[in-house]
Structure formats: C-alpha cells, structure tokens
Image (cartoon, grey):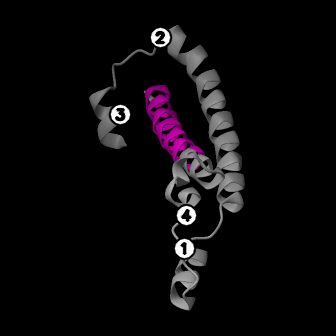
Amino acid sequence: MEFVNFMFADAVVSDFVSTAFPIIRAVLLGIVTIACLIMIVTTLLQSSANQTGSSAISGGASDSYFSQNKDNSRDGKLKRITIFMASTIGICVVLYFITGFWLAL
C-alpha cells in the first residue's frame, strides 16, 4: 500500500468520491448480505445429487421425461438462482474493494 500512496501522493479526491463512495459501499455490502442469505437458502433447498447415483447402483434408475428436463424443474431454477447470486456476490465484492481503493487515496 505504501507504493500506491507514493504513486498518488499528490492526488486530490473529489467531493463526489468522498461523499458518495461510503454510501455506495454500504449499499454494496447490503446487496452482498442479502445475496448470501438467498444463496444459502437456495443451496439448502436443492436436492442432493447423491440420490441419482444411489438409484443407479441399486438398479432403480429410470429415464423419465421429467428427469431429462431438469432445467425447467424446481432444482434447475434453484441452480440458476444460486449461480446468479454467486455472480452478484463476486461482482459486488470487487466493486466494494475498488471503491475502498479510491477512498484510500
């Protein structure tokens, strides 16, 4: 961090950055918190993948139309929500630290 401070020792932070970025960081932190809670719930609601493996071993596996269209099923929707929440968390965390970098100048 000393190198960054040395590079931008004469940098002046504008009033917009000093007033808006703390608010933006608080909103980003709130979004991350809500997305984490949603992701935990959707992960817990998904059925485990071990059920299909155990039925294949015991000989009870059947290829039905419902099992082939998993994207439109409840588990498919929960999987898409989980992926979207993980992406949202990643983007918000990166933005949070970028705004923190600009506040440290």
Amino acid marked by disc 3: Asn
Query: Which residue bears the numbered disc 2?
Result: 14
Residue pictured at 57% horizontal, 51% vertical = 76
Label pair 3/2, CB-CB below 8 angstroms: no
Q: Residues within 10 Å of mark 4 (few under 14, many from 20)?
A: few
Q: Which mark is residue 62?
A: 1
For numbered disc 3, what is the local secondary structure?
helix
Camera-near label (4 vs 3) is 4
**Closer to viewer: mark 4 or mark 2:** 4
Place residue 33 in its image quadrant.
top right
The answer to whether marks 3 and 1 mark residues whose Cβ atoms lie closer than 8 Å is no
Q: Report the magenta residues as a range.
A: 81-104
> Is disc 4 placed on a helix, strand or loop?
loop
Query: Helix, strand, or loop for circle 2?
Result: loop
The residue type indicated by label 1 comes to Ser
| Residue farthest to the top, as pictured | 15
Q: Which of 22 and 38 is in front in this view?
A: 38
- Does residue 2 belong to the magenta stretch? no
Q: Which of pointers 3 and 1 indicates the residue nearer the eye? A: 1
Crowding at mark 1 (Cα within 10 Å: few <14, some 14-19, many 20+): few
Q: Position of residue 61 (x, y in %)?
A: 54, 78
- Which dot, 3 or 2, sits closer to the camera? 2
Assign a secondary structure to mark 1.
Answer: loop
Whole-percent x and y of residue 67? 55, 61
- Is 83 situated above or below 60? above
The residue to which callout 3 is attached is 5
